[in-house]
Image (cartoon, rainbow, N blue to C red):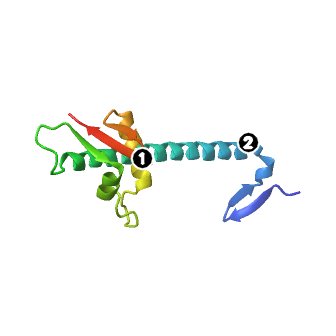
Amino acid sequence: MKMDTPVGQGQHHRSLHHHPEILELAEAHQNGCLDALIQLEGMSRRVQMDDTAEWLLAQIMGDPSVKPGQHQALYTRSQLTHRFAANPGRMGALTAAKLYGEIIPHLVSRQQCEVTKAGNLHTYTFTWE
């Protein structure tokens, strides 16, 4: 059985099944690349969430109902949805799922939002310095 197969001019390719260590190295390299990709995607999502949370707070602080020197604002769930997630079909728009499933919990974890519930009424209190 011939082990060298011509590949191109003056080059030879050894059959990979005769060198399992090469396949193991390639698999380890591929797994390392996939791990790095997963980490980068996670970092990107966190940065995007931070940016969206900062944008939301800036919009709330700039609301005409917020007076100078005021450091908190209250919104109901319907007010937030209407104001910030009213166009979910628009490309790049904030959706209610992202607002309540990601952004609000992120702000709660940063102690910049407190959620209270009385019956069916959800109230969101945003705070800033």
Which image quarter is the C terminus in? top left
Q: Secondary structure at mark 1?
A: loop
In the image, residue 82 lies at what x, y percent? 32, 58
Q: Which residue is mark 2?
A: 21
Percent x, y of residue 88: 39, 63
Which kind of residue does numbered mark 1 sit on? Asn
Q: Residues within 10 Å of mark 2 (few under 14, many from 20)?
A: few
Q: Please name whichever residue, 106 or 50, is drawn nearer the observer in this view of the structure.
A: 106
Q: Name the residue that disc number 1 marks.
A: 120
Task: Please tell me which residue is depicted at 85% across the width and 57% down the height of the picture.
Answer: 2
Give SS at disc 2.
helix
Q: Which of the numbered marks, if any, corresponds to residue 36?
A: none
> Which amino acid type is shown beneath numbered disc 2?
Glu
Q: Earlier in the sequence, mark 1 or mark 2?
A: 2
Residue 96 falls left or right of residue 84: right
Residue 44 in view: no
Q: Position of residue 119 (x, y in %)?
A: 42, 43
What number of labels is visible? 2
* Residue furthest left as drawn: 68
Q: Residue at x 31, y 56 (%)?
A: 84
Q: Is residue 96 above or below residue 115?
A: below
Q: Nearer the viewer, residue 5 or 67?
A: 67
